[in-house]
Amino acid sequence: MMGHEIDLKNYEIRTDLILDSIENKSVDIEKDIKTSDDIKVTKVFVDKDNGKLLSKKEGNYVTIEFKDITDTGNKDKLTDAFSCELKDMLNKLNISSDASVLIIGLGNEKSTPDSLGPKVIANIVVTRYLFVLKEDVKKGVRCVSSISPGVMANTGIETSSIVSSLVKEIHPDFLIVIDALAASSIDRINKSIQITDTGIHPGSGVGNMRREISFDTMGIPVIAIGVPTVVESSIIVYDTINYLFKHISYIKDNQSKNKLIFSRSNYADKIRDKDLSLEEKKEISGMIGELSDSDRQSLIYEVLSSLNYNFIVTPKEIDFLIDRLTDVIAGGINNSLHDEV
Amino acid sequence: MMGHEIDLKNYEIRTDLILDSIENKSVDIEKDIKTSDDIKVTKVFVDKDNGKLLSKKEGNYVTIEFKDITDTGNKDKLTDAFSCELKDMLNKLNISSDASVLIIGLGNEKSTPDSLGPKVIANIVVTRYLFVLKEDVKKGVRCVSSISPGVMANTGIETSSIVSSLVKEIHPDFLIVIDALAASSIDRINKSIQITDTGIHPGSGVGNMRREISFDTMGIPVIAIGVPTVVESSIIVYDTINYLFKHISYIKDNQSKNKLIFSRSNYADKIRDKDLSLEEKKEISGMIGELSDSDRQSLIYEVLSSLNYNFIVTPKEIDFLIDRLTDVIAGGINNSLHDEV
Amino acid sequence: MMGHEIDLKNYEIRTDLILDSIENKSVDIEKDIKTSDDIKVTKVFVDKDNGKLLSKKEGNYVTIEFKDITDTGNKDKLTDAFSCELKDMLNKLNISSDASVLIIGLGNEKSTPDSLGPKVIANIVVTRYLFVLKEDVKKGVRCVSSISPGVMANTGIETSSIVSSLVKEIHPDFLIVIDALAASSIDRINKSIQITDTGIHPGSGVGNMRREISFDTMGIPVIAIGVPTVVESSIIVYDTINYLFKHISYIKDNQSKNKLIFSRSNYADKIRDKDLSLEEKKEISGMIGELSDSDRQSLIYEVLSSLNYNFIVTPKEIDFLIDRLTDVIAGGINNSLHDEV
Amino acid sequence: MMGHEIDLKNYEIRTDLILDSIENKSVDIEKDIKTSDDIKVTKVFVDKDNGKLLSKKEGNYVTIEFKDITDTGNKDKLTDAFSCELKDMLNKLNISSDASVLIIGLGNEKSTPDSLGPKVIANIVVTRYLFVLKEDVKKGVRCVSSISPGVMANTGIETSSIVSSLVKEIHPDFLIVIDALAASSIDRINKSIQITDTGIHPGSGVGNMRREISFDTMGIPVIAIGVPTVVESSIIVYDTINYLFKHISYIKDNQSKNKLIFSRSNYADKIRDKDLSLEEKKEISGMIGELSDSDRQSLIYEVLSSLNYNFIVTPKEIDFLIDRLTDVIAGGINNSLHDEV
């Protein structure tokens, strides 16, 4: 009802992460989930039909979720897990151990939340000049080249044009593309790595003029590695309101019982999965509660955008997080590309 | 009513900006406001009584609000305005043109949103060694020294201890302290500069173990220059919910009228100042709407904190914003300190 | 005589600067010299025959020599002079005001003495995306794109391959290439800018595997802008020994006269152009003095290389010098490319 | 003889390294030398008398010389050796395992060859705030604080004043000071670490207005850790001329013998220790050869200074060298300070 009254624009939340899309659109899809040491790996194959529902390309998506990488032990475990999943993806695509690779670090080194790609590139072990110089290369060492093409605002050149011109020039057998992404839930910011064989796509993530970098445009396999490092304010608000519903509902259910129930240790898990009826939501939050999820999301987006307050934000600690993530991604790539390193 | 039901913790929003405090606590205080070229300067004197109401120190507070400093023209105008207000503060405190100054850049250069202080220091024109070496210093050039003491996490030393030990060693006549602050409204992030003669205070801003740097602790005047560069997620949510109320109320009032009213050009101004009755808020947002402002704020803080989602965030473009703000603050200080530059 | 005795290897000093080559090889060539405000501009056209003598490509070479760019006034004058000479080169090559340009910053941003190219690129005003998006571009604004391709040690890809692949992809009408050079005299390090229409060549400068970037390889005009930022130790030694000869000869000539002659103000100019006979050199420096210039140079190179002491060095202040030179080169390019900036 | 003719100024070569001083002044002093894995450790105790001869303070000096730290294995061995020598120095000074330390990183982070001190500080494990907050600190963890005070050109404050004011404020039991030094021979640049209990002294190294930081001025033990990262051009020239003498003499001795003698593998070792008579030097280099070592050094200094060519230089690869040295020094300090890390 209210949806009509406030004349919602047709607004579709943009996200780069398949798990966000699956949640947001409530698509029923088979997930292969594996957990160990606080690291959760979720594998999904999106077929043509689900791809349409999700506005995502057909292909394999692997999401690695983790908790704290300021701890060195956790960081090492994550690096191993990531390296292992990347190797697995190479096998799935039948990429042989002597296939040559060009690694592309997208993003702007001068802008911290967008600097992951260039920083990873600075830490990649490059070997291609050994092959060019016909030096005696050890068995098990793959031919690796890499580049940080910069961003269109600085180069004036579409990034995909730079990549495709290089592919034509040096003929790598496959591409790895690293990019910072936009999350569409506060749960996953700086807490997940997505590996996919579908490449990088326009319209995914925060809108800029990028063209697709994929098998379709490059003619060779493209493995995209993405880490969400930013989030729109409207998403923070939307997620929080949902948690407010769950929180209040939880309190109401438990208010006559004893106080110990409030212990922080299990609170989060208890409310995270709580479901509310529309009636409950209406009681808790009136007209706002009565809206469908997507209408509520659109309303928040609409209001913040109109006021120019829909900032894209990043955590205060982003410099340190990017440093850690650089170690994980570069270390994991170096490990998985060569039999001998 | 609801306040009792959900067992709100006694939570007080922390803010570094006097205008945020005045708004949040609805304290009635005289403001001297001056506007030109999109720059708004608000001067407030907080006396002892208002200080108690606001949890702020007695003294002068000048807030300069501005819009877009990516435009070079605007940046230059802001630098002039800031320089002018700083000179005015020096006059108000009867600081003579040959009084020596030590300028302190608080914060961590390695963490972008916290790097304003050290970056300003790197651009200050320092003259003290000329005086020490008894070189022939031009008339109108003040004795200026500066330091970036670092942050306690890196030095292990309370920053105020470093400052007070230097004050005892080199005996400056007054201090200028530059710091990145936490905003308590999304309106003001990276859009205001606060100048105050009350110094830097514990408990203001995002909680860390800082001790006060002020006339009381240093024995000389302390002018603090602060720019809000970060904000808590809970504040984004609280502010947005308030705008949702205003937006929906505005739509309801205008829904029978013609559509042109939606033109973005004047929408923001129209809703920003809209006031709603409790009844309206309840209709729009049920139990959440029914809460008092401070209870709603506490509720949001409580839920996000319990889930570990109350991130302190900064806009994605923070690297560029800090660069611009550095130019403004360092340029303005250099201009205002010397008759001859 | 001695030359035979010590079995000198056939060693040819490598230099990137035409004026160094002309001096080292004593080639007689017409120079068009213009001086104002401590800035000296020398224009040379190298024809085929002189090109062979100098091991340099046929074409135009403009050298701008300057003194102190830590002074802001001098820096601005140099920027104007450089901008003016670059415009002049564009005219000489009949490059029209709407011809599109791709600007290439060679070098490694992570290595200070080699970071000039990438740092200039970061300050170039790029416009090509306006043309791509068919936005309404002001008359007098040229289509500009730019890239920092990195160095082969990091990318594994020959830099000239990256450039040629981009030329094929985006079809610029001409190229500007910026590079840090090796000086072959201590007079010119960080004190000259060379502009040439002959491009960048292998074998010039400190030996690395670079291929030529020139009209011959790219099919479009290539303007190379080079600044010497490093020098081999052997060149410092060779130059100093020459000055020792001149100094001692000068002292001997003047030892009976009065002491005032030692005033530093005119000493340098007096000895710089002093010529010594072979006899004098032999008296002053025995077997070393008796060697021909090129044999002495080879000897020094040979000894330092054998000991692994022929370091390539850069002045201690290189960080600040690169910052200033970046301002000059980027500012000058931005000014000269557009009628309207 | 010639010394009189050319009116040599009384010029004394400045050096920060005890081994350079001992060589330059040919002082006979007992050395305790230990070599393993390409790492050579030389320990010297300078008593009052030798101190006068060497213009050095009385005390212990440990010099660690090494070859290639771009190799990770070598870097790790050097870190161990350095850590071990630092522990040894702590024991020699009877510094107990719970004595608190303030670590000072001298130098300017913005100037690469001078950035070692600040970069080491950024990698020190600081613990003092744990003690201040009375947290439960593990046994074997020492109270560590640290600061990078900046350079006088930027702060306007004598660095030793900043340090002494902090010593008075926080009362550490001893100081560790890290600094980039000037070498006085090309053999040792970026190839040695000096540890001494004599502190940092005025007049040592490239002349700036620094005051002493030592037991005498601070009242607590001061361990200075220095790495030569720069060298004056005049020293490169002086050293090279000496090698020219040795080289030519070697050639003359061996010219009738077979050519294989030129193999690079043993050439360096053979000429390095060659001694020449004055007669030989005169034959090889005439009046220049006839000068005493110190007069020749003064002459070169005089000529280069008069021409403003006595640059202080650093190797082209300084950025990478500083990164490696930072790892070694910070890693070694962290290891040696705590029983438990």
Image (spheres, coloured by chain):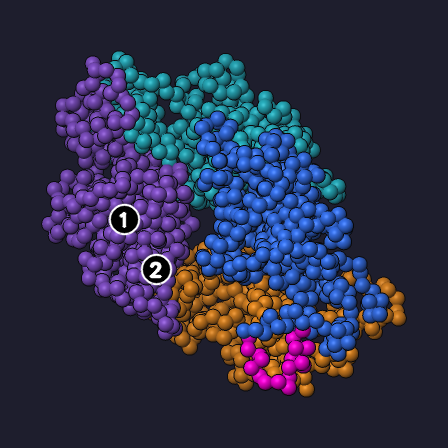
Chain colours: A orange, B blue, C purple, D cyan
Instruction: Provide the residue designation for mark 2.
Output: C341
Q: Main secondary structure of the magenta part?
A: helix
* The magenta segment: B246-264
- Residue D193 among magenta residues: no
Q: Are marks 2 and 1 on the same chain?
A: yes
Asked if residue C274 lies left or right of residue A105, the reply is left
Which residue appears at 47% of the width and 62% of the height? A107
User: In the image shown, does C83 or D320 lie closer to the viewer?
Assistant: C83
CB within 8 Å, label 2 to label 1 = no
- The x, y position of residue B179, in whole percent, is 60, 48
- The x, y position of residue C246, in whole percent, is 21, 26
User: In the image shown, does D257 or C67 lie closer to the viewer?
Assistant: C67
Which labelled disc corresponds to residue A140? none
Q: Chain of mark 2?
A: C
Instruction: Provide the residue designation for mark 1.
Output: C81
- The x, y position of residue C162, in whole percent, is 33, 62
Image position of D233 with respect to D26: above or below: below
Image position of A111 with respect to B109: above or below: below
Which amino acid, by three-letter code, is at mark 2?
Val
Q: Quadrant of residue A139?
A: bottom left
User: In the image shown, does D119 or B152 lie closer to the viewer?
Assistant: B152
Which amino acid, by three-letter code, is at mark 1?
Ala
Give the secondary structure at mark 1.
helix
User: In the image shown, does A47 or A140 lie closer to the viewer?
Assistant: A47
Q: Chain of mark 1?
A: C
Quadrant in which the N terminus of chain C appears: top left
- The x, y position of residue D112, in whole percent, is 44, 42
- Tell me if I can see residue A227 in this picture: yes
Q: Quadrant of residue C187?
A: top left
- Residue B257 among magenta residues: yes
Asked if residue C61 lies left or right of residue B120, the reply is left
Quadrant in which the C terminus of chain C appears: bottom left
